[in-house]
Image (cartoon, rainbow, N blue to C red):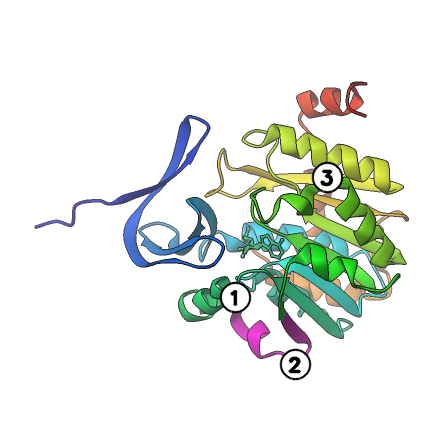
Amino acid sequence: MKDIPTWIDEYHKGSRFGLNGKVLLKKNSKYQEILIIETDCYGKALMLDGCWMTSLRDEKYYHECLVHPALSSIDKKSHILIIGGGDGGTARECLKYSQVAKIDLVEIDEEVINVSKTFLQEIGSEAWNDKRLSIHIDDGVKWVEKTNDNFYDVIFIDCSDPSEFSNLLFTDSFYRECKRILTKKGILATQSESPESFKDIHIHILKSLNKIFKLSKTMYSFVPIYPSGIWSWTFASEEELNLSKLYYKEVMRIEKDCDVWNLNFQNAAFQMMPNKIVKELNSKNDQ
Ligand code: SAM
């Protein structure tokens, strides 16, 4: 008898985003419910507390957009901090750059790393064996608080949506602390939620980073398994992000390896702010 389709859904504000597939693992860690699903159309996928996080088929849509606008536009990129990122995708993309000497990956939930290494090896790939990667099981907020000034060249906030243990990663005080531990020319790169399905937190993130950093700019693209499909990444720094001339050849080589990101795509993606977001950012309230 044909398998009865099993739909696994993310429920979001009266809508739902479902994938058909089979649950391979369901467990509760100290922090969240973790599911691995073998989906019919996106391959193996990770779900945390009922939210789709990543899948083998669409993970590059997200990880390439988070990493390459930052690392292709900064010369000194030896020390990197990744907050969250327990599936290994952000680390994998960072390690493509030869100048990256050390990555601290600070993930609060060790179970996410263990499950990703077992079921989603393709995402972390060689990153898990790379000597430049150090894994720390800790709260990103605490990690940043105990870090010295001017320590990191780039900080990636690759976290889940706001929840009781990730909420603080979206606050002004946390962004100020990130700025303190960044080098003068350093870049903060964060997933900045969706202008559609998480509009309020999206606006909050953009307003905060606009207030705290001299420059911040947001790019928009699609992550098919996320609510509404449209997502954003914001890059904040004290200096203009310009394509690194020093490492142009390496950037071109990395670009060839990408599924979504390239410099033309990036330039267009930085021009895609929906007008309703532009108007809200310019509105006086809650400046
Ligand atoms: N990289 C994936 C993607 O493609 O969007 C999803 C992000 S990753 C799975 C999100 C991670 O952030 C989760 O593993 C979660 O445990 C972690 N996280 C949430 N709050 C955190 C915190 N305060 N400190 C460190 N990690 C945190």
Q: Look at the image and tell me whether residue 71 can be seen.
A: no
Q: Residue 37 in the image: x percent, y percent?
A: 34, 55
Q: Quadrant of ligand 1?
A: bottom right
- Within 10 Å of disc 1 (Cα), the crowding (few <14, some 14-19, many 20+) is some
**Which label is found at residue 131?**
2
User: In which quadrant of the rendered view does residue 140 lie?
Assistant: bottom right
The number of numbered discs placed on residues in the rendered structure image is: 3
Q: Nearer the viewer, residue 31 or 287?
A: 31
State yes or no: residue 127 in magenta.
yes
Q: How far apart in space, not on screen, are marks 2 and 3 (Cα)?
A: 32 Å
Residue at 76%, 25% in the rendered image: 281
Q: Secondary structure at mark 3?
A: strand
- Amino acid type of the residue tagged 2 in the rendering: Lys
Q: Secondary structure at mark 2?
A: loop
Q: Residue 59 in the image: x percent, y percent?
A: 51, 54
**Which label is found at residue 218?**
3
Q: Nearer the viewer, residue 133 or 223?
A: 133
- Amino acid type of the residue tagged 1 in the rendering: Glu
Residue at 31%, 51% in the rendered image: 40
Q: How far apart in space, not on screen, are marks 1 and 2 (Cα)?
A: 19 Å
State yes or no: residue 154 in magenta.
no
Q: How far apart in space, not on screen, are marks 3 and 1 (Cα)?
A: 30 Å
Viewer-side label of 3, 1: 1
